[in-house]
Image: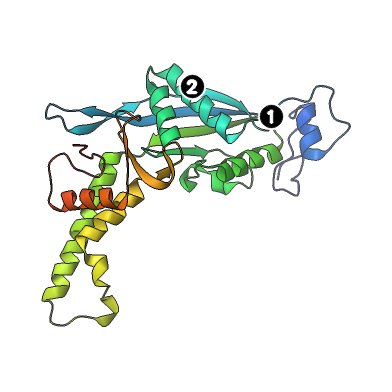
Amino acid sequence: MSHFGIDLFGRENPPPGYHSASELWRIQNLGPPPDQLATQTIDLSTSFKLVYPDKNSNNKLTWIPRKSKGKFLISIPAISTTFEQFREIVARKCKENSEGAGVIVQNALESGSPGINCKVWMNLPAAHKFKKKANYKVNNINSFTHWTATIIANGKDRTNASLEVKMISPANLEKEAKAAVKIKRHVMTHASTSKHQDLSTLVAAEDFDIYNVYKNQIFDAHPPNVKYHKRIPVFIDPANETCYILLTTVNVEKWAKALVNETQYYSFNSLATT
């Protein structure tokens, strides 16, 4: 316990002069509101890890990593910044840090592919969910609002936090999807040859059908996008978002069949258009 005691919120009472007039009014409700109430600001030490599409010498789609040039500062008003404004600011600041990075971020945020995780962490009293190891992400309005509301309730004029913008690599997703298919194929083969099967482990045949597995994974990887169609899932060319294919049942069946047959130019993130 400090010389000045401990308050009911578990925060040590700082010495006189530690808090600004704005902070004293917000945190302890002391006195009238200051004539010039300071804007509560979040200072984010930011970095990014992105990927962007390219074609190799065999004209095959590959994903090139792109990292930030060290950490850079993003400052936003805690109260007035909306989720959409936050994403726009992040894209703009990424562009200022590294030429072309802003376009990569903006395109991914607008199209939803590749996915982007915005991880934030900070040290605030009684806010353990925002520690770095908690892996808290502000990927939607609700999580963003909860994060900023916590900062606002803390009452400080300026809050230091960290932000990591990390793009989900389609290449890694494809590897995971292929691994899942191989596992299912192995289980299916083992189940068909085993003489003594535990009934509790039996699964419907459709779940082991590789063709259906591929179809489900295609739908999961390419959700609907209102920019192209309200309800039908869509494949968007990673290299050119103006090129797209609506994933109707016929198109998905064709794609899944090509994956089963390991047809050239087909992968989970590359769809032949001819």
Q: Which residue is mark 2?
A: 92
Q: Which mark is residue 40?
A: 1
Numbered disc 1: secondary structure: loop
Q: Amino acid at mark 2?
A: Arg
**Along the horizontal axis of the image, is 2 left or right of 258?**
right
Q: How is the image coloured?
A: rainbow
List x then y, in percent, for residue 174. 25, 45
The residue closer to the viewer here, 254 or 122, is 254
Question: Are circles 1 and 2 on residues that touch, CB within 8 Å?
Answer: no
N-terminal-most mark, 1 or 2: 1
The residue closer to the viewer here, 84 or 33, is 84
Q: Amino acid at mark 1?
A: Gln
The residue closer to the viewer here, 193 or 7, is 193
List x then y, in percent, for residue 228. 41, 38
The residue at the far right in this view is 32
The crowding category of the residue bearing disc 2, from other C-alpha atoms within 10 Å (few below 14, some 14 to 19, many at least 20), is some
The residue closer to the viewer here, 61 or 151, is 61
Q: Which mark is residue 244?
A: none
Give the total of numbered labels: 2
Residue at horizontal 27 percent and vertical 55 percent from the top: 215
Instruction: Give me the C-alpha separation between circle 1 and circle 2.
Output: 21 Å
On the rendered image, what quadrant is the C terminus found in? top left
**Along the horizontal axis of the image, is 199 left or right of 118?**
left
Q: Quadrant of residue 51?
A: top left
List x then y, in percent, for residue 107. 41, 29
